[in-house]
Image: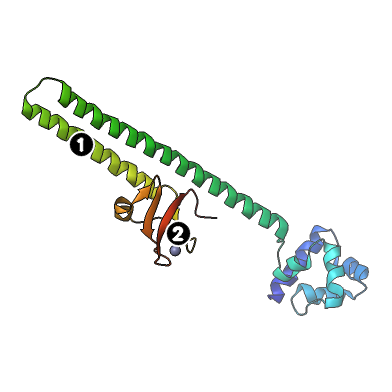
Amino acid sequence: MDQIAIGKFISQCRKEKHLTQAQLAERLGVSDRAVSKWETGRSMPDVSIMLDLCEQIDISVNDLLNARRINMENYKEMAERTLLEMREREEQSARKMLSLEWVIAFIATFAMLGFIMLAAFVDMPNWLRGVIICAGILIFAVGIFFALKIETEAGFYECPKCKERYVPDYWKVFWAPHINRTRRMRCPHCGKRGWHKKVLSKEK
Ligand SMILES: [Zn+2]
């Protein structure tokens, strides 16, 4: 507790209320010397008088002891709102990325099927057939690589055992057996294997 800072704060709040030291002293039933001592940090207001003092200069005891206006309710509300907004934004971008994953996987799959059909049904020399099939497989591989990269980095995976939410290593996701986006992996937090579900935000 910084007595000097508290003193300055009392003085500042008193002036904001347009009160002289003598006027404040009178309202509190103490001497002006007492008020002067508080304001210069030489002494603290007595506990019995503190509530009354705070009321006169329009602050809470919490403000007084911290030497500044805190207004805890507003502060908490603001912090909560900011957090909520941040989480919403984070979830929204994760959701967008995950839909992009579907689009990329879809295009890659159909491009490969298209190339293979072309090679199978159109009359052409065998070497060209080979090239077209290879190109189709290559497009598919590149597409799946990027789709999986998006899946790894958008949102988080949740361990069913300890509920830890984390972003895994790309290759862990790549090799993990999966059902849709739920993957069987080892939890980096508790070390247990399990089916880890995709979730959009870090917070529960
Ligand atoms: Zn775990």
List x then y, in percent, for residue 36.
81, 74
What amino acid is found at the position of numbered circle 1 in the picture?
Ile
Task: Label 1, secondary structure: give it.
Answer: helix
Query: Residue 203: in sight, yes or no?
Result: yes
List x then y, in percent, for residue 198.
44, 50
Give the side of residue 87 with respect to residue 175, left or right. right
Q: Quadrant of ligand 1?
A: bottom left
Query: Is the residue marked by circle 1 packed among few (<14), some (14-19), or many (20+) residues within 10 Å?
Result: some
The front one of 192 and 153 is: 192
Q: Is residue 50 above or below residue 131?
A: below
State yes or no: discs 2 and 1 in contact (Cβ < 8 Å): no
Q: How is the image coloured?
A: rainbow
Q: Is residue 135 above or below residue 13?
A: above
Give the side of residue 92 with respect to residue 123, left or right. right
Give the side of residue 15 with respect to residue 119, left or right. right
Query: Residue 71: in sight, yes or no?
Result: no
Task: Label 2, secondary structure: give it.
Answer: loop
Residue at 45% over, 44% down? 94
Residue at 24% over, 32% down? 112
Give the side of residue 32 with respect to residue 117, left or right. right
List x then y, in percent, for residue 134.
15, 35
Q: Looking at the rendering, which quadrant does residue 35 occupy?
A: bottom right
Marker disc for residue 137: 1
Residue annotated with mark 2: 159
Q: Is mark 1 within 8 Å of ligand 1?
A: no
Query: Is the residue marked by circle 2 packed among few (<14), some (14-19), or many (20+) residues within 10 Å?
Result: many
The front one of 14 and 114 is: 114
Q: Which quadrant does the C terminus fall into?
A: bottom right
Q: Is mark 2 within 8 Å of ligand 1?
A: yes
